[in-house]
Image (cartoon, rainbow, N blue to C red):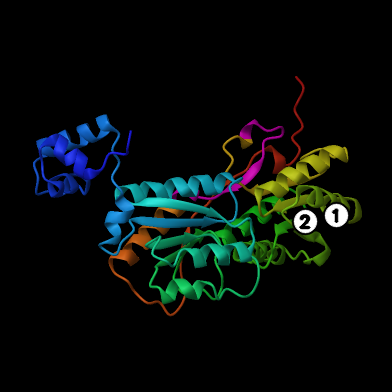
Amino acid sequence: MSQITIVDLAETLGLSKSTVSRAFRDSNDISAKTKARILAKAEELGFSPNLYASSLRGNRSQTIAIIIPEFGNKFFSQAIKGIELVARSKKYHTLIYVTDHNVKNEASIVRSLVNGRVDGVLISASGEGKDHSHLQALVDHNIPTVFFDRSYDDFRGHFVTGNDFESSRLATQHLIDNGCKRIAYLVINQNVSIGKIRMDGYKRALEDNRIAFQEELVLDTENDETENKAAIRNLIRTYRPDGIFASVERLAISAIRVAQEENLKIPDDLKLICFSCLDITDLLNPSLSVVKQPAFDMGKQAANFLFQSLDKPTEMVEQQTTLLESSLIFQDSSQRIRISKKN
């Protein structure tokens, strides 16, 4: 059976093609009864309008792109939910691309989007490289772009992220308050925006407490778990930290595994806190202390900025950063050892 067209649907209903088309555009110049009749018959016949093709005639694809470094992170799934909520309310579709933390992949994706495929772009930076000239292609083609969570210093536009400096300062201070004096900082690429800012918060807490910053306690790692575990094991064996602040969740998980293999007890021998959006941190043993970012709200706010730019394009001469508050949840992994009293 050949695919049904909008002309076929109109003939079946005894209506004009323009009337049927207006129903799918949610136009107000046809009655609700007629619109419902059209949509019901379309569903019955399995007809789906080519919104992309029709919207191109109005110079809009009704589609936005979401570019993220990875899928295997609860933060990004929650951020995408926030973006999708706003996009659906605007009757927009989303296309999701993954860079695998590779700036070359990011550049390739961006260059593929300037042919009218999308009206706007939401992006969390890959974090690699100093050459971000590919972003100019979006500017040259008047495609509004908003960064969330991770950005580049040379990007001029809206950037929505968490209050990472203050959250990191408070997380490090919490470890200090619980007796830690040699706190390691674990990061994946300290040159990306969140890595730098979170490290600055860590360093400020040390400074506030007159604890000397030690470069050897900073571990700049990769995205390979095997290599990360080996590096963390070497750090623990060589420099004997009594606390770890992990700037990303996966490094905390690797640290927990290494601690188990090294017969170190958390929090007795090693206290731990990390950035994480996991909802099951209370079920871990010990329960994991976290800085929980407002991922859903971050995605939602970034999408709102993007649609504002679509409605009213504005050229920005510098980065405009919006900070959202994170939640610090202190649990057993970072607390002082509690000695229970015997009756």
Residue 152 image offset from top left, x and y in percent: 56, 70
Q: Which mark is residue 235?
A: 1
Badge 1 marks a residue whose secondary structure is: helix
- The quarter in which the N terminus is drawn is top left
Any part of residue 126 in sight: no
Tell me which residue sits at (78%, 51%) in the image.
228
Residues in magenta?
Answer: 282-297
Tag 2 residue = 184
Q: Residue at x 27, y 39 (%)?
A: 4
| Mark in the foreground, 2 or 1 | 1
Whether the magenta-drawn stretch holds residue 291 is answered as yes
Tell me the quarter of the picture where residue 69 sits: bottom right
Q: Nearer the viewer, residue 53 or 241?
A: 53
What residue do we see at 28% from left, 57% from top?
Answer: 55
Direction from residue 33 to residue 61 in the image, left or right: right
Residue 222, disc:
none
Furthest residue toward right: 238
Gap between marks 2 and 1, in whole Å? 9 Å
Query: Of 273 and 20, which appears nearest the observer?
Result: 20
Residue 228 versus residue 268 in the image, above or below: below
The quadrant in which residue 34 appears is top left
Amino acid residing under circle 2: Ala
Please provide percent x and percent y for residue 35: 15, 39
